[in-house]
Image: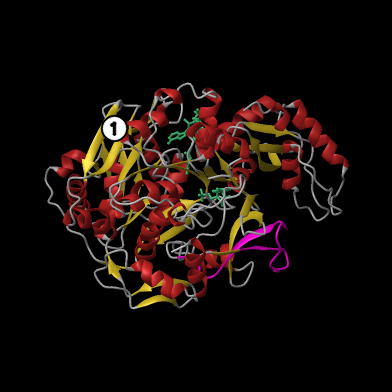
Amino acid sequence: MTYKNEFQTSIEKPEIFWEQKAKDITWFTFPEKILSKNENGFYRWFEGGKLNTSYLCLDYHVENGRAEQIALIYDSPVTNTIQKFTYQELKNKVALFAGLLASKGVTKGDTVIIYMPMIPEAVIAMLACARLGAIHSVVFGGFAAHELAIRIDDAKPKLILSASCGIEFDRVIPYKPLIDAALMEAEFEPDFHIVLQRPMKLAELESEKEIDWNQALLSVEPHSYVPVDAHDPLYLLYTSGTTGKPKGIIRDNGGHAVAMKYSLTSVYDTHAGEVFWAASDIGWAVGHSYIVYAPLISGCTTILFEGKPIRTPDAGTFWRIIEQHRVKTFFTAPTAIRAIKKEDSEGKLFANYDLSSLKYLFLAGERCDPSTYEWVKDLLQVPVIDHWWQTESGSPMLANMAGLGLKTVKPGSSSTPVPGYDIQIMGEDGQILDTHQEGYVVIKLPLGPGCLPSLWKDDERFQKSYLSRFEGYYLTGDGGYKDEENYFYIMGRVDDVINVSGHRLSTGEMEEIVAADPAVAECAVVGIADKLRGQRPVALVVLKDGKDISQAEIEKQLIQSVRDKIGAVAYFKSAILVKRLPKTRSGKILRKIIRNIADGVHFEIPSTIDDPKILDEIREVLRENKIGSEFDDG
Ligand code: COA
Ligand code: AMP
């Protein structure tokens, strides 16, 4: 099949196309209907199908000749550990841990929160939930207690699974105090908290509800897989929206399994027995799809990396892993490449390694700037593929599809639509725009299988956030344009979401935290360009009348609040006092213009602006505080 044929069939005859792809995985009962709608009119894939995702990841391979193949390699430069698990070993561990979950009352449909660092037990926990038909919700370890509390109250988990600590470069981060604080803040109370003790920092277990992971495993029996419906949720993954309340993205079992299998072969050209490595974190969608589910469903070897692109121990660590584990397909974020480029711009460390196994580098999570693209392409001498997707989609929607024959690369573009995605650029008024015209990136419904069927217990927000703006289309939240050959150029978010080091964050949420400070009258938080991290947040703050507080004091206070509420990962380092904010005459803050001033981007002064003189004031204050592209030395 060529790309052209695949794409055309997927758009013209989606049911025939996806029925065929569904046959590539093993079902206990094959779906009765390929595409249908539920009572709310939302599309659903594979009604009537029965399967188990953990079975597909493990038992299926054990039964089909891969028992002794390595399924998972844990490579942790921060603990000096490399550990390998065959499919048989991983299956045994997952089945036993599923037995533990079941013994604590977890059954099909229950939710379980996993707040863990990048260790094998985190993957085991995810697959054990899937084995029971329980719904896991992994919370990124870099989030603060408050973020965890919000997710506990929304997901209402029966259990929390965690480890005693995480490791950031050489810093040990105890998790128990974070979880205790989250549980204090949350209204909902899980039944148990199971803690994996890591020797670098043990957690004190203080009540019968707090259970030692390894101790508890001594007295349980392995549990078999439980068949679930295609529509039953496999997991929930919270992602930043435009407010302080994150969105609980649901991933169902059936559509997800089919999308994972299809994408690994067609987008990533990776097949059973080959080594796939996504250097992400299991706390993000990339980690769910391409550290855990897609490589395992496909019978590959996957790598779980507990480290960073630099300083663990150096900027050659990625290349060391690719050589040592014979990685064929590598996936990371452009920010990681920029971090390496900064430390080893001439590729001296790179020269120490044999990367002959490597066939592709895939980049996603943020726009890949052409200079990063050129640098890494020249270094690696393999195809470098920028592809675009979101937590909501769970797999790529734009990609140069390596499995269907690579096309010309156009730097700055994430290439053409993946089969199943009818992507268009739309203007304010709902008209499809022509080539080279920038507008909203939208997708004609239905979305491909594996995309979110809805938000967790919030169909209304799903409808409002994604489906209401343009009838019959899904609103991605990104802006961009396309060219004559249907290559798309994603130019960034059109809402209050920013991407900092490939981490998706909400400036709206940061504004809520800043505005809650008793000294603050009003504020605007915008994401400005950052050479290393892609973007970083900056707050402009107006004090309440009569508040006598210095710039340094308020900045320190606000930095701490955002760190306490969201986490260090927000990389919130600047809060600047201004006398007033630029607004329209109707009072709307002109955030995009603040961003343009900081980024040194040309813009038209809107006719609706209240007082254009304020723009000079903002320009001046940003310059005084050394904020903006001219001061960004990467
Ligand atoms: N647990 C606890 N804290 C974490 C964390 C985690 N899992 N992840 C990040 N943080 C903390 C960092 O320690 C840092 O804290 P500090 O302000 O006290 O130093 C803060 O959050 C900001 O982290 P980050 O933006 O990652 O900066 P950094 O200087 O630590 O590292 C990079 C810079 C570029 C090396 C790093 O951002 C990186 O590896 N980026 C690639 C990320 C990626 O692959 N994303 C893809 C997601 S799909
Ligand atoms: P997340 O949900 O964390 O995966 O973030 C999704 C968002 O990241 C998208 O909506 C885009 O704004 C951005 N993004 C992801 N991949 C790319 C890419 N290849 N090019 C441009 N932006 C991207």
Q: Which of 78 and 389 is in front in this view?
A: 389
Q: Is residue 229 on the magenta stretch?
A: no
225 lies above or below 337: below
Q: How many labels does the image show?
A: 1
Q: Disc 1 on helix, strand or loop?
A: loop
What residue is at 25 percent from the left and 52 percent from the top?
128
Residue 37 position, x and y percent, is 45, 77
- Residue 448 horizontal side relative to residue 88, left or right: right
What residue is at 17 percent from the left and 58 percent from the top?
224
Q: Is residue 447 on the magenta stretch?
A: yes
Q: Which of 590 and 515 is in front in this view?
A: 590
Q: Name the residue under label 1.
A: 203
Q: Write down the quadrant of residue 545 in the picture.
A: top right
- Residue 539 horizontal side relative to residue 109, left or right: right
Residue 349 position, x and y percent, is 45, 22
Residue 244 position, x and y percent, is 55, 50
What residue is at 22 percent from the left and 54 percent from the top?
61
From which residue to which does the magenta span run?
A: 424-448
Q: Nearer the viewer, residue 507 or 57?
A: 57
Residue 593 position, x and y percent, is 76, 45
182 lies above or below 248: above
482 lies above or below 570: below
- Residue 419 horizontal side relative to residue 85, left or right: right
What residue is at 40 percent from the left and 51 percent from the top?
269
Is residue 505 shown to the viewer in this render?
A: yes
Q: In which quarter of the image is the C terminus?
A: top right
Looking at the picture, which amino acid does disc 1 mark?
A: Ala
